[in-house]
Amino acid sequence: MALPLLPGYSFNRNVGKEKFHKSQHWGFRNNVRMLVSEEKPGIGGEPLIGQKVKTKYSTYPKGEGTGGPSWVVFDRQVLRFNAYLEDEVLDKSQEIYRIRFYKIYFYPEDDTIEVNEPQVKNSGLPQGTFIRRHRISLPPPNDDQFYTVYDFNINIDIIFYGRTFKIYDCDKFTKNFLRKIGVKLNPPGQCPKDPYLKMRKEKLEHVEPRRPYESFDTLRQFLEYDGKVLRFFCLWYDSGSLFGERRELVLHYFLSDDTIEIKEILPENSGRGAMSFLLRRSKLPKYGPPGLHQPGQITDRSVLNVFGGLSSKQMYSYMLDKYTLGKIDQEFLKDSDLFLGATINVWGRKVIICDCDEFTKSYYKVKYGIENFTSVSCKPPPPPKIERKFPPYTGFGSEEDSLRSCLSLEPVPYQKKLLKEDSYGNIGNVLRYFARLITLKCTDADRIFVISYFINDGTLSVFEPIERNSGYTGGLFLKRSRVKKFGQEVFKSELSEYIKMEELYVGAKVNVNGNIFVLLSADDFTLNYMEKNVDKFPFSNIELALQKLKEEESKSREIKQVFSAADCNHTKIVDFNTFRDLLLDITANKLIDQEILTIARHYRVPEDMGSDVDLLIAQAQEKLKKNMFELFDRLISSCVYEDREKKNVLLNRDMKRLCKSHRLPLTADLLEDLLSWFEDSEGQINYKSFFHALNWRMNPVADLQAPDYLKERCEDVWFGMPSPIPVKFVRYLDLLKDVYGLEQD
């Protein structure tokens, strides 16, 4: 029995050199286990006993002194040889011998051998493992020894258990292995062909079988295209229905067996059943309904006769018609027949292919090279829009509430839609205008009114200031409500139109329930709001107003002289009434009062408002004293808590929120004016100074007779009646510089 290779043992048995045992140990280098023998160098550099020689394992043998056990060195290494065997055949006249091919595997780690015979189709022989893996002894008289690697070569005969195998070639690894161990390789031999297999192959190629076998192999198509489905979106115009109907379909083409199924897309409330299949999965004939056929006409094979079965041992057999006489061929739809825009016949129904999915497009692009996938519109044309008419308004309740009873069986109360301006911080958004009544009665011509428009819900109210000895009671002229535009029909189906805030500006005429008002002026908040929202109030746009003045640039010198003549004292300013009259003359009444007021506010002269601050504080302290409000320390404490940065200032909106949360008894307008006076350039307010000024107990102010802003009287030629004037003086020279570029002489 061959022993494993030991350290120091010569691998080549032909070389009769053996070395005695040397002192050695195992070492590691670069994470590789290595054997180290201790040898000393001799004269001329020859290795002697004691010199250190480091040997690294290799997948190939290195001749003598492999340096490790064979089961470690040759682990998972196999030598493969190609061989054949001439097997004598005695009981057949067609062949004398048979060539059988084998694979011989030699395992160097334990000198074991395995022989396998590859399987040959229709050979009729048991093939596979011919000799299992084990050590095989040499033929007699050396049967006490076993085969080793040195017994193998190319183009030699080798005997296993009395059978002679002829090795004619081996693989590349085996050749390299044998060269490494010193075996001289013979040239490769020729592998003969089996004469019987050659004769049988030639015979089968020229002989036509009695019963022709037609192959219907669909397994390859199934394995290649299983799970791959083409999807098309189709349209079927069902003209056979009562009014004609367009029905949307989805066609699935299964590539594994060329079958088709069609599903219908049922819209909501279609009234159709849950069965959405128009065609179950099956092959679809290409040319419509083929008609009825006799049994046996549609078949893959035609049987001419059946014979046999005369005895119990005889099997039944049959004879096929290789000429397929009378066979009916059916053509079914294939993937090549399906393309966008094609019309297919689905059992008498004409279906149009309109579109497909992305996978289907990529499939046709790769297989057929189609690039154009223009879809066909399968959507029906939109139906004519039928105008919905509602019954006319009955007069009971509001128009919106009456309309609710026409929209649903259970009427839902109408919910008022608040505008965006109704968010927090814009509670007091009320536009106030001063107006005069236009009437033929001389007694009513001097009456002045205040029109308030509430932005949050679009309501409007009219108030007449009370004036002594005027002959009118004054007070509420029209309560807060939405005002319809004058001249509309009362009992109609459409909703009425109401007065909007875009229609309110200085100089406009408003018809309120038959009473015509001309808007003379507005308060400061209203004018500021209009200038901030120039998209809704274009007459408050300073750029558009100045553009109208630039159109008179040809008269720039005359305009300069007119303004200089009006300014006798050369103060570079004129009063508002004079400024208005001059602009109307210059532009020939092209500018309206709102545009003139916008220009005047832009170039107005700043006024000393110290007296106004004292007036506002006096009004605030008077109201606080009447309501006995003294919680100023609590307000300051809340402000200190809100002041995270400890700067003694808060934003305007935070101050307004704190005042309302502590129920400060001041109106929204008065509170807004007070906060605006104490506000700095960054929009912050010193809360200690603010509440210190309002503290009527600690810092009372003198009782001032603050006249109501509606009672303010001033000389107003163009109004012809008492009215507030938002601008007193205008810097006309700055206006001329910006518009015409004129300088002072």
Image (tube, grey):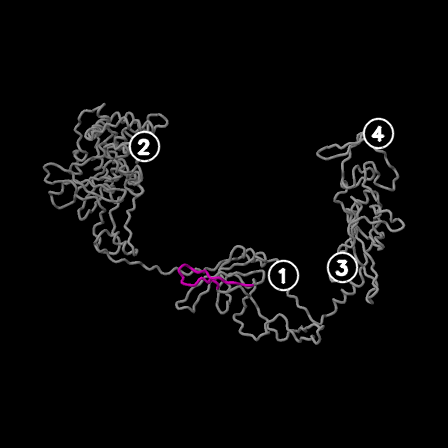
Res 219 label: 1
At mark 4, the secondary structure is loop
First in residue order: circle 2 vs circle 3:
3
Q: Which residues are magenta?
A: 259-277
Name which quarter of the figure residue 459 lies in: top left
What's the amino acid at mark 3? Pro
Name the residue rendered at 72%, 70% in the picture: 208
Neighbourhood count class around disc 3 (C-alpha, 10 Å): few under 14, some 14–19, many 20 upward: few
| Helix, strand or loop under label 3 | loop
Question: Which residue is under mark 3?
Answer: 126
| Nearer mark to the viewer, of 2 and 1 | 1
- The location of residue 501, given as percent across then percent down, is 26, 44
Q: Which residue is mark 4?
A: 49
Above/below status of 203 relative to 25? below
Give how far apart the Cα atoms at labels 3 and 1 are.
Answer: 28 Å
N-terminal of the pair, mark 4 or mark 2, is 4
Give the amino acid at mark 4: Ile
Badge nearest the viewer, 3 or 1: 3
C-alpha separation, residue under disc 4 versus residue under disc 2? 99 Å
